[in-house]
Amino acid sequence: MLIRRATVADAQVVSDLATRTFVETFGHLYPPEDLQAFLEEAYAVERQRIILAHPDYAVWLLEDDGVAVGHAAAGPCGLPHPEVVAGDGELKRLYVLKSHQNGGWGARVFDEALRWLERDGPRRLWIGVWSENLGAQRFYGRYGFERVGDYEFPVGRVRDLEFILRREASASTGHG
């Protein structure tokens, strides 16, 4: 298994993997037309190419023998919370295919994203997580993230309740 930072040349791989992991994790929750519209907009290859080319964003790929099986994406915070300020960072995505979960690799990819987000020193970090994803909430809690708000995340006509998690700049980076 290898973790590497994705490049613009990986836009198709990131698009395919983001689509596959989202469908595997959440696809059953949405009407097919809503899911398809969301995937086509959120994970379009050209959108991934723009993100990968932008210096304020980064994506990491988890590869098993050269095949992408997980990814994390990070950048400036875009969550709708009144206390978000310029300079705050956000974990945008963290997904590992079910076939590769529970081996500690998700934590390793997350650690890479955290190191990158705090490359210039500690700063306030944010994560949006589905309100019913209790495992993810526990995982992020081990890193010092706490719920500070919520918002609706649109997938087509469906509105998911998402929790907004935050870790202050002074919080520990260990996940113990």
Image (cartoon, helix red, strand yellow):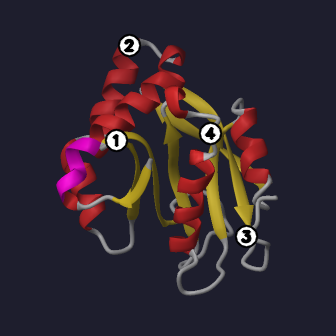
SS assignment at label 4: loop
Packing grade of label 4 (10 A; few <14, some 14-19, many >=20) is: few
- List the residue tagged with mark 4: 103
Q: Which of marks 1 and 4 is nearer the N terminus?
A: 1
Q: Report if the CB atoms under discs 4 and 3 are less than 8 Å apart.
A: no
Q: Report if the CB atoms under discs 2 and 4 are less than 8 Å apart.
A: no
Q: Earlier in the sequence, mark 4 or mark 3?
A: 4
SS assignment at label 1: loop
- Residues in magenta? 9-13
Between marks 2 and 4 in the image, the one whose residue lies nearer the viewer: 4
Q: Which amino acid, mark 2? A: Pro
Q: Earlier in the sequence, mark 2 or mark 3?
A: 2
Q: Which residue is drawn at 69% across and 40% down?
A: 136
- List the residue tagged with mark 2: 32
Between marks 4 and 3 in the image, the one whose residue lies nearer the viewer: 4
> Between marks 2 and 3, how big is the CA–CA gap?
39 Å
> Between marks 1 and 4, how big is the CA–CA gap?
16 Å
Q: Is residue 106 left or right of residue 156?
A: right
Query: If the image is split into quadrants, where does the C terminus sit?
Result: bottom right
Q: Residue at x 34, y 41 (%)?
A: 65
> Between marks 1 and 2, how big is the CA–CA gap?
32 Å
Q: Report if the CB atoms under discs 2 and 3 are less than 8 Å apart.
A: no
> Between marks 4 and 3, how big is the CA–CA gap?
20 Å
> Between marks 1 and 3, how big is the CA–CA gap?
29 Å
Query: Is 37 placed above or below 152 here?
Result: above
- The percent coordinates of residue 56 (x first, y second) are 38, 73
Q: Which of marks 1 and 3 is nearer the N terminus?
A: 1
